[in-house]
């Protein structure tokens, strides 16, 4: 049982696929640790133990270095979960080397792992050809680089099992399109064939060089440039703390202040989550101690596998893949590296000993499994928050130091807790500004740009918004710097549009707003609001573009649009109230006719003044209400549209809108089964607008109503029976 469970442990991790997971590795980590718990629990009954000391010591050194990194870090949930996988695999490693023999592994590993490689290759090829929908060919991995590394590690076992199977798996590596994976596969294949034909090793060694040169020459230059900056930063960080490094996740935590402008521009300001080089990451996070322990483990693993070709080639592929990516982060790939290593070091039970080490490992796994399970639950709760169906407090109940959940809840204590974990977290520092007095916020934002994140676009936008009222030139300068830092950002263009709109430079505002819409590549309420504000403000100078107003209203919530119409009507009424009333006292020298003529003239002047002062507000309300009724007609939208038309003096149009509102109320009453109320509403609608039955919108709406609610057919026919224009709407 123990040997078969250990044999299938990497395949269990390979088979875990959770496309809906926010943290993709969480389920894999839980699967590895849970199965390791079962293996170690079964191994406690084994009477004999035999540990390979060199490899066991090397693994213990890696674990000690990772544990030291974890202790020195302010907080790192991701590093804790990674260490838990290392502990689990170390426990299984001890179990395998103590309880199984090499013969079992050498007979079973090539068949099982070669077949797994073929299966994953089929999935990768189907994803690459589009038969299975996927953004990139990655099988059950997080991305194509991990998939290529996994196939490269399985290829030597496939070659050992069947030669044609090995070539198929290598073809799967090529199908992923990962240059690092292809280099790892080339090195593994060369070593496998050189083992059989040592005299051709030099000729075969040209293949990895060709793959490397081709990848650098014809690959994406942006990727190479970005990673070059990451590697330089990781090396400088390791050189600053050469012995112990910066602690777990030290690179991610300390990188923002030293981030180069070129890398920020190329990556579009995306958050950097890793170095994409296992060795430099170990150097930055763990210093020389972390790097040397990792290198010693790989070197001892290759040395112990020197007599068994598949394990050595697979471990070489793992080591080469770490030069351009992070295979050590994926539990599947780490298990694929450690299990064959255990197989080569295994000698079977040779001497009696107390299973104290396994008992300690069992206790550790018993403590780690619930931690991972709680993280998976927090991960699912966070996914519900992103979907709009969950609560942030549910996430924090499972994982109290969840960075994103703390940021969303955003209390001062939460933000300060984030900064204890990530001192250069620009979003948390930016959010702290809301708890400062208004006059202290600009200095707070400038400190962020000076000490924590020199290229943060959102901080520049916040600073520009604050100084926009007093110093428009400085605001424009800050926004131009933000655009230069991240040409793909849309918020600087949005604020530039707002600045230009307030300066009544509508052509410039429209240009920047279109750039913001193009860069956002989707509908956003803030963009829609600015588009609506621009069209409303520009209608004083030229005709309104109703199409753009409708475009904006479609992307706004109905509640916001209605409140916007009501605010415009309220401003119009307030403007009416500012017009002084005429003098209504009769002078002694005036006759009655003269007094009446003067009063009529004064009242007419007052009405004209009221209309002049409130016209722009009534017109705003009318334009938005027309777009809303065109998009989603309702009783309320028609009534608001009628109020706006009445305020503009368009009485006939106002009566038409009010009659349409009464018509919709008629349909609502019919739907509720209140025929008498429906007949009364319809009679009022006809009295307000006798031509209502001939309106095209009325005919279409009535026809759709009868088709949607056939149970209201007879009642509707009785209410509208006297109108010949509406009879066509009752065709079943």
Image: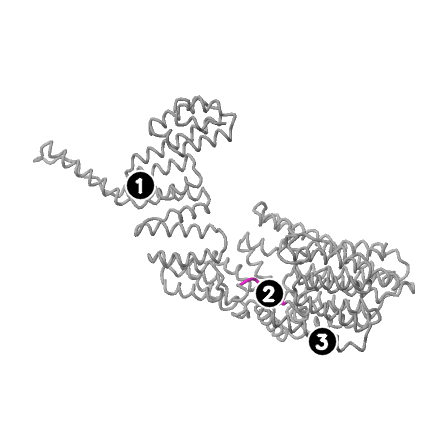
For the N terminus, give its image quadrant: bottom right
Question: Which tag is nearer the camera, tag 3 or tag 1?
Answer: 3
Q: Is residue 562 left or right of residue 607?
A: right
Residue holding disc 1:
573
| N-term mark: 3 or 1 | 3
Q: Is residue 353 left or right of residue 619?
A: right
Q: Which mark is residue 253?
A: 2
User: x, y (%) of residue 33?
Assistant: 75, 56
User: Whole-Å distance between the Cαs marked 3 and 2?
Assistant: 40 Å
Residue holding disc 3:
206
Question: Which tag is nearer the camera, tag 3 or tag 2?
Answer: 3
Q: Is residue 244 visible?
A: no
Tell me, yes or no, whether the two marked residues, 3 and 1, touch with CB atoms within 8 Å: no
Q: Is residue 657 visible?
A: yes
User: x, y (%) of residue 447?
Assistant: 48, 66
The magenta region covers 269-275
The chief SS type of the magenta part is loop
């Amino acid at each position: 049982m123990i040997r078969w469970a250990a044999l299938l442990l990497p395949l269990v991790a390979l088979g875990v696929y959770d496309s809906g997971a926010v943290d993709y590795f969480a389920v894999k980590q839980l699967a590895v640790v849970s199965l390791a718990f079962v293996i170690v629990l079964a191994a406690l009954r084994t009477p004999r133990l035999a540990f390979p000391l060199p490899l066991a010591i090397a693994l213990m050194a890696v674990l000690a270095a990772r544990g030291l990194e974890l202790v020195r870090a302010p907080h790192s949930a991701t590093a804790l979960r990674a260490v838990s996988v290392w502990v689990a695999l170390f426990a299984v490693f001890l179990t395998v080397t103590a309880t199984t023999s090499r013969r079992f592994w050498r007979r079973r590993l090539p068949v099982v792992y070669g077949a797994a490689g073929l299966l994953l290759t089929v999935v990768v090829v189907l994803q690459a050809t589009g038969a299975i929908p996927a953004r990139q060919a990655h099988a059950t991995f997080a991305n194509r680089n991990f998939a290529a590394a996994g196939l490269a590690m399985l290829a030597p076992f496939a070659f050992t099992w069947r030669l044609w199977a090995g070539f198929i798996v290598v073809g799967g590596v090529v199908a992923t399109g990962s240059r690092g994976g292809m280099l790892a596969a080339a090195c593994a294949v060369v070593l496998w064939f050189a083992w059989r034909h040592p005299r051709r090793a030099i000729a075969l060694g040209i293949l990895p060089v060709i793959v490397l040169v081709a990848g650098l020459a014809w690959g994406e230059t942006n990727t190479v440039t970005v990673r070059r900056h990451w590697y330089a930063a990781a090396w400088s960080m390791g050189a600053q703390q050469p012995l112990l490094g910066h602690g777990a996740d030290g690179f991610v935590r300390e990188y923002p202040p030293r981030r180069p402008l070129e890398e920020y521009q190329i990556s579009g300001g995306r958050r950097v989550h890793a170095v994409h080089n296992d060795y430099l990451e170990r150097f930055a996070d763990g210093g020389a101690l972390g790097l040397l322990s990792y290198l010693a483990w790989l070197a001892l693993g290759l040395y112990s596998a020197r007599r068994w070709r598949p394990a050595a080639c697979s471990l070489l592929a793992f080591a080469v893949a770490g030069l351009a990516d992070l295979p050590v982060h994926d539990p599947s790939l780490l298990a694929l590296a450690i299990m064959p290593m255990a197989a080569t070091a295994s000698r079977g039970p040779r001497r009696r000993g107390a299973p104290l080490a396994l008992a300690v490992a069992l206790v550790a796994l018993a403590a780690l499994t619930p931690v991972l399970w709680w993280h998976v639950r927090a991960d699912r709760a966070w996914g519900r928050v992103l979907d709009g169906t969950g609560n942030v407090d549910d996430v924090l109940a499972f994982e109290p130091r969840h960075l994103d959940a703390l940021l969303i809840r955003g209390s001062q204590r939460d933000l300060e807790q984030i900064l204890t974990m990530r001192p250069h977290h620009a979003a948390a520092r930016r959010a702290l500004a809301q708890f400062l007095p208004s006059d202290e916020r600009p200095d707070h934002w400038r400190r962020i740009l000076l000490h924590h994140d020199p290229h943060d676009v959102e901080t520049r936008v916040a600073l520009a918004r604050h100084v926009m009222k007093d110093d428009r030139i400085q605001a424009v300068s800050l926004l131009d710097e933000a655009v230069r830092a991240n040409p793909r950002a849309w918020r600087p263009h949005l604020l530039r549009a707002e600045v230009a709109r307030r300066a009544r430079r509508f052509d410039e505002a429209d240009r920047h707003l279109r750039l913001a819409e193009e860069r956002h590549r989707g509908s956003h309420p803030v963009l829609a609001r600015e588009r609506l504000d621009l069209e409303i403000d520009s209608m004083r100078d030229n005709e309104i573009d109703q199409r753009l107003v409708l475009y904006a209203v479609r992307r706004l919530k109905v509640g916001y649009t209605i409140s916007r119409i009501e605010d415009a009507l309220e401003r119009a009424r307030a403007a009416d109230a500012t017009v002084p009333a005429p003098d209504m006292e009769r002078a002694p020298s005036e006759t009655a006719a003269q007094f009446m003529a003067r009063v009529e003239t004064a009242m007419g002047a007052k009405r004209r003044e009221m209309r002049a002062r409130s016209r722009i507000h009534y017109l705003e309300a009318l334009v938005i209400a027309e777009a809303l009724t065109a998009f989603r007609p309702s009783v309320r939208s028609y009534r608001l549209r009628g109020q706006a038309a009445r305020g503009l003096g368009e009485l006939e149009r106002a009566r038409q809108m009010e009659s349409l509102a009464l018509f919709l109320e008629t349909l609502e009453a019919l739907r509720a089964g209140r025929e008498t109320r429906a007949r009364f509403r319809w009679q009022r609608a006809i009295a307000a607008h006798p031509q209502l039955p001939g309106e095209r919108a009325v005919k279409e709406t009535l026809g759709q109503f009868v088709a949607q609610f056939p149970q209201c057919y007879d009642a509707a026919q009785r209410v509208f029976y006297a109108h010949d224009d509406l009879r066509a709407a009752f065709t079943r």
